Amino acid sequence: MAITNLDTPSPLIAPWYHAPRRSAAVMRVRSLPPVCCALLLACAHAPDGPLPGASDAWQQIAAPKRAPKLELHLWSGYAELAAWPALNALPFASKGHPPGLDVDVFVSASSSGAYQTLVTDSVLLRGTIIAELSHDHAAPSARGYVMQKGSDDLWSYAELDGRGMVLAEGALAACEGCHALAPSDHVFGLPRAP
């Protein structure tokens, strides 16, 4: 059995725990071309025109047509609604409509009592009108929100300015989405004392 010197590895067989030996100078020279290429590409002038594979279809699209300006008109029941007494004793800050808006609530006489005593699963009469109007009608930010229950038991909505002029009306998605979460017939009711 021959004894080999472990300190001097054979040139043909590398020890199992080492990769073939290379000098640091060789490693530096071999890594230079990729680094140079990367630097040159980073400093190169960007090509003019669209990038390959990019779409320029956006240039062919015509400007969107503007929706026709809504002609303001007085909400049909505003004069009647303005004569109703407010159900709340004092104006309160609306939690469901724009913040900082102090409001009063008005409800048609046929449903006023039922509205004031709402409990879960209460159902209001067809034709019920509920309005939340800015307490200060003259303020530039004054708004009104009206909901009316139709003969099909569906609610329609209207957003009014401080003078009762219609800003939006109908089956308004934002109104429908929020009021669908209400505990009683799409209605939240008056604030309750803690």
Image: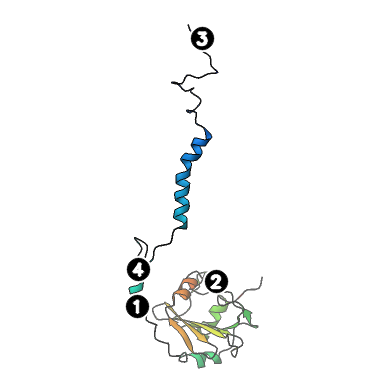
Query: What amino acid is found at the position of numbered circle 1 in the picture?
Result: Ala
Query: What amino acid is found at the position of numbered circle 4 in the picture?
Result: Asp
First in sequence, mark 2 or 4: give its number: 4
Q: Which residue is mark 1?
A: 62
Q: Are marks 4 and 1 in contact (CB under 8 Å)?
A: no
Residue 118 shown left or right of residue 47 in the figure: right
Please tell me which residue is depicted at 46% across the width and 21% down the height of the picture: 11
Q: Are marks 3 and 4 in contact (CB under 8 Å)?
A: no
Q: Which residue is mark 2?
A: 119
Residue 47 shown left or right of residue 118 in the figure: left
Q: Are marks 3 and 1 in contact (CB under 8 Å)?
A: no
Mark 3–mark 1 Cα distance, whole angstroms, equals: 88 Å
First in sequence, mark 3 or 2: give its number: 3
Q: Which residue is mark 4?
A: 56
Image x and y of residue 115, in percent:
54, 78
Query: What amino acid is found at the position of numbered circle 2 in the picture?
Result: Val
Q: Which residue is mark 3?
A: 3
Please tell me which residue is depicted at 47% across the width and 57% down the height of the picture: 43
